[in-house]
Image: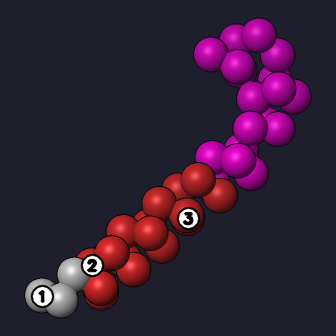
Amino acid sequence: AFFRRSKPAGWLLMPYLVWVTFASVLNFTIWRLNSGG
């Protein structure tokens, strides 16, 4: 969606998407380790 509007706007979202993906994986991993399974 952002790439269609303007390429710089799309590229500026990339670090945000990488960070959200990393934070989600980290959160899931910590949740799995703390689940007591």
Looking at the image, tell me whether mark 1 or mark 2 is earlier in sequence order: 2
Cα distance between the residues tagged 3 and 1 = 23 Å
Q: Main secondary structure of the magenta part?
A: helix
Disc 1 residue type (three-letter)? Gly
Q: Position of residue 1 (x, y in %)?
A: 62, 16
Kindly report which numbered mark, 2 or 3, lies closer to the viewer in this rendering: 2
| Nearest the eye: 9 or 24 | 24
Disc 3 residue type (three-letter)? Phe
Kindly report which numbered mark, 3 or 1, lies closer to the viewer in this rendering: 1
Q: Is residue 23 magenta?
A: no
Looking at the image, tell me whether mark 2 or mark 3 is earlier in sequence order: 3
Cα distance between the residues tagged 2 and 3 = 15 Å
Q: Could you classify mark 2 by the number of other residues whose Cα lies within 10 Å: few (under 14), some (14-19), or many (20 or more)? A: few
9 left or right of 28 in image: right
35 left or right of 26 in image: left
- Confirm or deny contact between disc 2 and disc 3 (CB under 8 A): no
Which mark identifies residue 32? 2
- The residue to which callout 1 is attached is 37
Cα distance between the residues tagged 1 and 2 = 8 Å
Q: Position of residue 23 (x, y in %)?
A: 55, 64
Which mark identifies residue 22? 3
Residue span colored magenta: 1-18
- Compared to 9, does 6 lie above or below? above
Where, quadrant-wise, is the C terminus in this rendering?
bottom left
Q: Secondary structure at mark 2?
A: helix
Q: Position of residue 2 (x, y in %)?
A: 70, 19
Residue at (70% x, 47% y) in the render: 16
